[in-house]
Image (tube, helix red, strand yellow):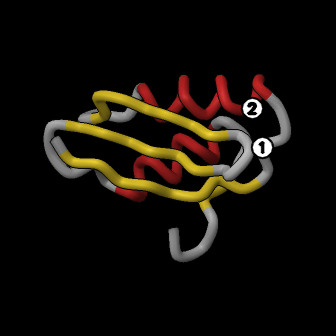
């Protein structure tokens, strides 16, 4: 099981968290998604490596963005 952690910018409420979880959960290879509103941390797990660019695109589809360097 691979785990990657990113920081999401722009989330302000529970709906934001739900949107990010839904979009990232649809990325190929993603097995689990956890989002912490207070810290902005997004933790993605999968059986193999998950493409950061696909995660970033999913976060952007939800209306947010990954922090630089995360």
In the displayed orientation, state which residue is furthest to the front: 38
Q: CA distance from mark 1 to mark 2?
A: 5 Å
Q: Secondary structure at mark 1?
A: loop
Expressed as whole percent of the image width and height from the top left, the position of residue 10 reads: 79, 51
Quarter location, residue 52: bottom left
Residue at label 2? 16
Query: Residue at left 37%, top 34%?
Result: 27
Q: Secondary structure at mark 2?
A: helix
Neighbours of disc 1 within 10 Å: few (<14), some (14-19), many (20+): some
Q: Is residue 31 left or right of residue 21?
A: left
Quarter location, residue 59: top right
Reply above or below: 50 against 68. Answer: above
Expressed as whole percent of the image width and height from the top left, the position of residue 30 reads: 31, 34
Expressed as whole percent of the image width and height from the top left, the position of residue 26 reads: 41, 26
Q: Which mark is residue 62?
A: none
In the displayed orientation, state which residue is furthest to the right: 12
Reply above or below: 14 against 53. Answer: above
Label 1 or label 2, whichever comes before in sequence order: 1
Query: Residue at left 44%, top 45%?
Result: 43
Query: Residue at left 59%, top 58%?
Result: 7
Neighbours of disc 2 within 10 Å: few (<14), some (14-19), many (20+): some
Expressed as whole percent of the image width and height from the top left, the position of residue 9 reads: 72, 56
Quarter location, residue 20: top right
Reply above or below: 60 against 33. Answer: below
Q: Nearer the viewer, residue 56 or 6?
A: 6
Marks 2 and 1: in contact by CB < 8 Å?
yes
Quadrant holding the N terminus = top left
Residue at label 1? 11
């Amino acid at each position: 099981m691979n785990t990657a952690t990113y920081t999401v910018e722009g989330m302000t409420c529970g709906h934001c968290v739900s949107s990010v979880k839904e979009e990232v959960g649809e990325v190929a290879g993603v097995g689990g998604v956890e989002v912490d509103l207070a810290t902005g941390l997004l933790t993605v797990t999968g059986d193999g490596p998950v493409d950061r660019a696909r995660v970033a695109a999913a976060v952007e589809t939800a209306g947010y963005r990954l922090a630089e360097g995360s």
